[in-house]
Image (tube, helix red, strand yellow):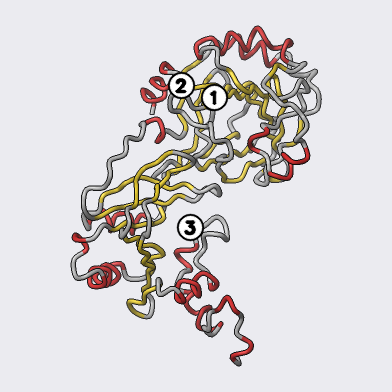
């Protein structure tokens, strides 16, 4: 390849060399769910150009960056788990022989890693490196959960970091809260036949358009309007800038109002959206994802909690959630149960049965009683 054929993003590096380095990251990239976090030839070239990618041997590499300003480390949204200070080091993109990488890191930062404040970003689901850092005396700080559902584990070694008080409810993922009066669930189920057509959910993880909803309470009197405006794109907001959206009961609400009020009585009066959510049978699926576009979501006091009441379901309906450590939990929510789900965590739903799954899904402000219930059942 001549010099003129090298593209600007390559920063002078031969494409075959970059591709060869990319192959070293096959295991690392297997944990990535989106192309934006894979360590590929373009960001390898960028890291080499900035002198941030270091070679230990032919198969072992890592990146090292130095913080220039104080910055927050967030689990998701505004949930802060730590603070980087100017001069702190961040190690990431580790691949190859871990012992050799560790020795090289120690040598590179003046012979002793204990004299420098160093943060490590690794995949939570890569248990080999997770356990390795634990064995080396690094402190687990918390997770970083991306909008695509990847989970990083953040470790730290150095001086005592700035303390951060994170509510324990921020670590909850999916929690069964209680059994509810089954007669209420049956009463709701008996009146589902005359529902209007469900609205397909606009999410890009709605595989085969199998997930749909209707609003009992939302941002329009029309039950087919299932959108929360704050979650929508800039383009959508611009197109609807002259419309007035506010929380209100829809025309469908009265049909189910008495039963829904009985279900929600223990949760207080700060009820936001109330929807029926349907998942088609025969393998209907919501692919692994997170819902982090709503800044109000969460199980901590003052946040908007997501509560599921299964109305119509079958044993083939499986909800999978990956907790903050990357541990996978599969549950079947039964009719007559009430569940809390933190949608900021990675989750997936599959209906492997032969009938539609319909849940009553409620967003409500977390008060002390609910936060306590979540903690008791974690």
Q: What residue is disc 3 on?
A: 31
111 over 345 or under it: above or below:
below
Q: Earlier in the sequence, mark 3 or mark 2?
A: 3
Q: What residue is disc 1 on?
A: 307
Nearest to viewer (mark 2 / mark 1): 1
> Between marks 1 and 3, how big is the CA–CA gap?
29 Å
Q: Secondary structure at mark 2?
A: strand
Q: Residue 331: x and y, percent? A: 50, 33
Q: Residue 237: x and y, percent? A: 72, 39
Residues at discs 2 and 1 in contact (Cβ within 8 Å): yes
* Along the line of sight, the residue nearer the viewer: 41 or 330: 41
Q: Residue 77: x and y, percent? A: 49, 41
Residue projecting furthest to the bottom? 2
Q: What residue is disc 2 on?
A: 177
Q: Earlier in the sequence, mark 1 or mark 3?
A: 3
* Along the line of sight, the residue nearer the viewer: 32 or 239: 239
Using a 10 Å C-alpha cutoff, classify the residue at mark 1 as few (fewer than 14 neighbours), some (14 to 19) or many (20 or more): many
Q: Secondary structure at mark 1?
A: strand
Count of numbered tags: 3
Using a 10 Å C-alpha cutoff, classify the residue at mark 3 as few (fewer than 14 neighbours), some (14 to 19) or many (20 or more): some
């Amino acid at each position: 390849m001549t010099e003129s054929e090298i593209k600007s993003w390559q920063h002078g590096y031969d494409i075959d060399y970059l591709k060869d380095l990319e192959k070293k990251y096959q295991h690392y990239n297997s944990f990535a769910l989106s192309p934006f976090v894979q360590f590929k030839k373009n960001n390898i070239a960028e890291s080499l150009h900035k002198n941030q990618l270091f070679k230990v041997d032919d198969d072992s590499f890592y990146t090292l960056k130095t913080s220039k300003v104080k910055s927050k480390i967030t689990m998701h949204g505004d949930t802060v788990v730590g603070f980087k200070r100017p001069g702190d080091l961040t190690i990431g993109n580790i691949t190859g022989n871990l012992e050799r990488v560790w020795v090289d890191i120690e040598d590179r930062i003046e012979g002793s890693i204990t004299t420098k404040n160093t943060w490590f970003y690794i995949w939570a689901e890569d248990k080999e490196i997770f356990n390795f850092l634990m064995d080396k005396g690094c402190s687990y700080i918390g997770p970083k959960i991306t909008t695509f559902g990847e989970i990083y584990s953040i470790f730290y070694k150095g001086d005592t970091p700035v303390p951060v008080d994170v509510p324990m409810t921020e670590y909850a993922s999916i929690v069964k809260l209680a059994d509810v009066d089954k007669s209420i669930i049956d009463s709701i189920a008996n009146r589902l036949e005359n529902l209007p057509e469900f609205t397909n959910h606009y999410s890009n993880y709605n595989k085969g358009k199998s997930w749909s909803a209707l609003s009992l309470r939302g941002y329009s009197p029309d039950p087919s309007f299932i959108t929360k405006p704050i979650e929508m794109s800039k383009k959508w907001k611009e197109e609807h800038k002259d419309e007035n959206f506010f929380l209100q009961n829809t025309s469908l609400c009265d049909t189910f109002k008495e039963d829904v009020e009985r279900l929600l009585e223990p949760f207080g009066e700060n009820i936001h959206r109330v929807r029926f959510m349907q998942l088609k049978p025969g393998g209907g699926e919501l692919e692994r994802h997170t819902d982090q576009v709503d800044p109000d979501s969460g199980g901590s006091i003052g946040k908007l909690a997501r509560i599921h009441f299964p109305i119509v379901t079958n044993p083939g309906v499986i909800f999978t959630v990956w907790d903050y450590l990357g541990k996978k939990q599969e549950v079947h929510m039964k009719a007559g149960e009430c569940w809390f789900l933190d949608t900021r965590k990675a989750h997936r739903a599959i209906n492997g049965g032969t009938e539609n799954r319909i849940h009553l899904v409620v967003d409500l402000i977390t008060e002390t009683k609910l936060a306590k219930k979540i903690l008791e059942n974690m």
